[in-house]
Amino acid sequence: MNEETLLSIVVPCYNEEAVLPETIKVLTKILESLVNEEIISSQSFILFVDDGSADKTWQLIRTQSEADSAIHGLKLSRNFGHQNALIAGIETVSDHADCVITIDADLQDDVRAIRTFVNKFYEGYDVVYGVRKGRDQDTFFKKYTALAFYKLIAKMGVNLVQNHADFRLLSRRAVREFMRYQEENLFIRGIIPLLGFRSAKVYYDRQKRYAGESKYPLKKMIQFAVDGITSFSIAPIKLVMSIGFLLVLVGGGIAVYAFLNWLMDHTISGWTSLILSIWIIGGMQLIAIGVIGEYIGKIFTETKKRPRYTIEINTMYDENNDKEPLSHERPYPENIR
């Protein structure tokens, strides 16, 4: 253990006013406990990232930030999405923290696992994954679609930690290596295993949302899955090409069958087979164009090199905030690395 180790907890928030007071209370209690036991530095802090919330999320963060030196806030200028909010928080604390823990604000992840995360960090692990033990809290549809997604993406060669979301610990060097990945469509759950550092898993029971509504409806979950697949694999394009070849073979077989019927004078005039062929092939063409368009769209986005997020307010460096800003750089504890 090293009481000089500075821990930062990054919490992305989007319209979380219903749950945020309890989240702040619970996380502050955990942080204070670790500090009092001299497990982490007294300068350790929590950074709440407001991802363009339309409710009172930022007011709550700002008020708590002014009242407690262990709480900071980062306000993005608009909603950039959960993954970009995570990146914004991680990059903001990267020069201050010896290790960073990311956790959602809904209190579904077991905050008691944070202590185990830190212990694993002291054992020499640069990445610690929070992995849920099961999906008993999920609906039937969400449970089996999630499992299907993990199986599908694994077959495509993407190395994901099953049943792991964004509850994890990263050491400083893991954070710095992660920050070298500059693509616009950054699928964090797929990138972290690519870092290659020593990792561990901590299993926990996922709870029901404390309050508020889920920020991942079906539409967002589908888009998230599509982004994950297309960010790491060209398998969908290969699949479409394979189906195209198969349709050509089927078309050739139908042509031979029609020719034989013509030789035997068994031709029957009609439009059913023609219409079916038009709809099937036309549908496949549209699917193929859509899949290719998804990749071209990603290329278009990447070439523009636009920033992933824009920070409107950062209480760590806000001149109107009475708190002293954290030091820009701290030496890494020698007995840890």
Image (tube, helix red, strand yellow):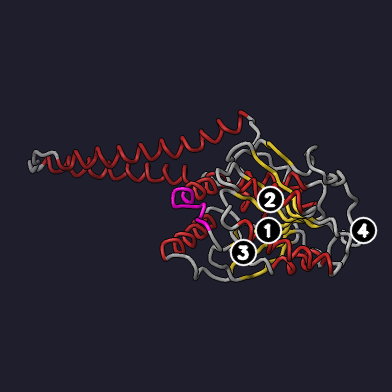
Q: Amino acid at mark 4?
A: Glu
Question: Would you call the spot at circle 4 few (<14 residues within 10 Å), some (14-19), or many (20 or more)?
Answer: few
- Residue position for label 2: 48
- Residue position for label 4: 334
Which picture quadrant has residue 116?
A: bottom right
Of pointers 1 and 4, the one earlier in the residue sequence: 1
> Which of label 4 and label 2 is nearer to you?
2
> Which of label 3 and label 4 is nearer to you?
3
Of pointers 3 and 4, the one earlier in the residue sequence: 3
Q: Amino acid at mark 1?
A: Ile
* 241 lies above or below 199: above
* 37 lies above or below 175: below
Q: From mark 4 to mark 2, how far is it between C-alphas?
A: 29 Å
Give yes or no for contact between labels 1 and 2 (Cβ–Cβ under 8 Å): yes
Question: Would you call the spot at circle 2 few (<14 residues within 10 Å), some (14-19), or many (20 or more)?
Answer: many
| Disc 4, SS | loop
Q: From mark 1 to mark 4, how far is it between C-alphas?
A: 32 Å
Magenta region, residue range: 212-222
Residue 109's disc is: 3
Left or right of 284, for residue 328: right
Q: From mark 3 to mark 4, how far is it between C-alphas?
A: 31 Å
Of pointers 4 and 2, the one earlier in the residue sequence: 2
Q: Residue furthest top?
A: 304
> Which of label 1 and label 4 is nearer to you?
1
Residue 24's disc is: 1
Residue 111 is situated, as x and y percent measured from the top left of the image, at 67, 66
Residue 190 is situated, as x and y percent measured from the top left of the image, at 62, 52
| Disc 3, SS | loop
